């Protein structure tokens, strides 16, 4: 995974964005983003009005994608986001809950009912409702990490 922020110069990280889009459809049978007839679907994902994040498959996963909406919600720029262990996006008191969630996703390939508190880089807390979290797998079922789409959240 490149460290460059998605842009027209790297086709909005097409390879990774395609994995997100394809794996989401594979496990949920739903489209992550509408097919762009007059534009670039990878750009549309990066600029979507909802949050999309992913982390790699390391034992202590590191974020490797965050669209603009996610960067806004977490109050973090791309370069900082993609070096952050995903566990640090949750408060310490919810780490056990987060581990149970990730285990559930690993077992079932996705969940569509995640609700919980996350914390931004400035310490602001926000409540996520009914997020979808899924395993990123390629067409050969090779595991590449996990991703989440957050349609609803509110600051608390």
Image (cartoon, helix red, strand yellow):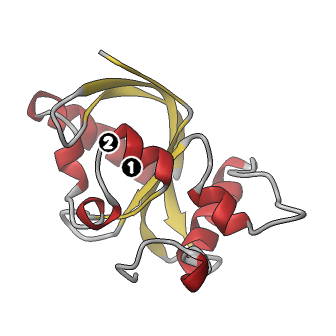
The spot of residue 142 in percent (x, y) is 50, 77
Q: Is 44 on the left-hand or right-hand side of 38?
A: left
Q: Is 19 on the left-hand or right-hand side of 105?
A: right
The relative height of residue 106 versus residue 133 in the rendered view (above or below) is: below
Q: Is 80 on the left-hand or right-hand side of 67?
A: left
Residue that lies at the very extreme toward the right in this rendered image: 37
| Residue drawn where x is 18% and y is 63% of the image | 60
Q: Is 69 on the left-hand or right-hand side of 11?
A: left
- Pointer 1 local density, CA inside 10 Å: few below 14, some 14–19, many at least 20: many
The numbered dot on residue 71 is 1
Secondary structure, mark 1, is: helix
The numbered dot on residue 74 is 2
The relative height of residue 156 versus residue 9 in the rendered view (above or below) is: above
| Residue drawn where x is 50% and y is 72% of the image | 6
The spot of residue 108 in percent (x, y) is 51, 48
Q: Is residue 60 visible?
A: yes
């Amino acid at each position: 995974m490149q460290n460059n922020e998605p842009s027209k110069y790297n086709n909005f990280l097409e390879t990774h964005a395609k994995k997100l889009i394809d794996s989401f459809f594979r496990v949920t049978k739903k489209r992550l983003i509408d097919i762009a007839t007059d534009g670039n679907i990878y750009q549309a994902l990066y600029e979507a009005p909802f949050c999309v994040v992913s982390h790699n498959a390391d034992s202590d996963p590191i974020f490797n994608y965050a669209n603009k909406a996610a960067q806004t919600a977490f109050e973090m720029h791309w370069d900082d986001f993609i070096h952050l262990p995903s566990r640090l996006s949750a408060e310490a008191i919810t780490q056990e809950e987060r581990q149970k969630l990730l285990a559930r996703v690993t077992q079932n390939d996705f969940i569509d009912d995640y609700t919980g508190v996350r914390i931004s880089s400035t310490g602001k807390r926000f409540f996520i409702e009914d997020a979808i979290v899924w395993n990123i797998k390629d067409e050969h079922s090779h595991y590449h990490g996990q991703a989440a789409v957050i349609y609803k959240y509110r600051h608390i």
